[in-house]
Image: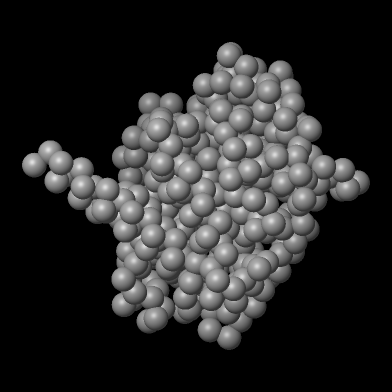
Amino acid sequence: MRDANPFVEWVVKVAQPCNLACDYCYVYESADRSWRRKPPVMAPRTADQLARRIAEHARRHALPRVRVTLHGGEPLLAGLSRIEHLLGVLELELHGTAKCDISVQSNATLLNPLWMDLFRRHGVSVGVSLDGSREANDRHRRARNGHGSHAAVQRGLDLLRRPENKALFAGLLCTVDLDNPPLDVFESLLAHEPPAVNFLLPHATWEHPPPGHDPDRTPYANWLLTVFERWYSAPRQETGVRLFEDLVDLALGGEVRSESTGLAGTDFLVVESDGTIELSDSLKVTQEGGAATGFDIFAHDFDTAARHPAVAEARRGGLAALADVCRGCEVVRLCGGGLRAHRFRPDTGFANASVYCADLRVLTTRIRDRVVADAGALLGSVS
């Protein structure tokens, strides 16, 4: 049976280990320890089967385009030959069926000219995780020996920004830390001339709230709004910020398919290094096996995975997917209830507002009011 809502993106865990030991990592520092039972790197036969399954899904649903994100751990630890093999079989299996946009999300510490040559030949874009300046980044993103990672990331970014590589630079991914001044962080990120920036809230649940959690003072909303005003009021757009762009689009009546904003359902799956099919790995912060489905790419196709009750529930969009307290909220169409993992309580599962609910309400309300007022003023001036 063909699922009416196909997947269009796969996050592929080509390597389980990481050469950093970030203290907020949702893979290694969370409730789920299943990574210990998975192979450290994806075997060639698993890569082959993955490519066949993606191509099968694309043909079945007549998809013109699919996306694959190489992830980890640190995906470059899989090694050049394994990554080149995966890229080759994806191109082979999808040839004549669908265009495949491939990216890698890396800490950039292992980037070198050989990697960039491979990525240029296969058109692989590179996203880099960086939390700002040396001080801001190295507060959490450290090597296992305790040394900061900023200098190594800087070397990787310098390589990525060379003229021959710059077209592959996808952008920067920054986790919000309330101890880091927001404008200092943003200016530090801008110094790398990223085409895009995205800000992530630290993964947290009601059982394990985020650092500085305070629904009365909404510190995460205040932090992000400071950056929003700097970004939105700039005389020219210096970079895209996906979180802000999504909220602006939603505030002006658009639709956005995102895991963390809006009411649309999700359209991606995670495939682990052993070929097991999982939900968003942010769910690893909820409980042991929080992202697991029990399915794998050898025994199950992706349409079968879509009908798994846990997958169907996690993908379900709209108000019906949210807690009662969210459904009547005036900004629910913007925040979408927040990231699913952030709604978790051990006693009630996901039938809750986000642990960031107060922050999301302030953030989305302020952005909505600002852009709607500006849009109204602009329309008034031309009428």
Residue situated in front as seen by the camera: 214 or 7: 214
Image spot of residue 337 (x, y percent): 43, 68
Residue situated in front as seen by the camera: 380 or 268: 380
Instruction: Tell me which residue sits at (68%, 52%) in the image.
Output: 180
Say if residue 81 shows up in the picture.
no
Q: Looking at the rendering, in which quadrant would you find the N terminus?
A: bottom left
Instruction: Tell me which residue sits at (53%, 40%) in the image.
Output: 197
Image spot of residue 63 (x, y percent): 34, 39
Instruction: Tell me which residue sits at (20%, 43%) in the image.
Output: 378
Instruction: Tell me which residue sits at (41%, 31%) in the image.
Output: 236
Residue situated in front as seen by the camera: 237 or 343: 237
Instruction: Give residue 161's quadrant in the image.
Output: top right
Counting the numbered discs, the total is 0
Image spot of residue 246 (x, y percent): 39, 49
Model colouring: one colour
Q: Is residue 76 left or right of residue 142?
A: left
Q: Looking at the rendering, in which quadrant would you find the C terminus?
A: top left
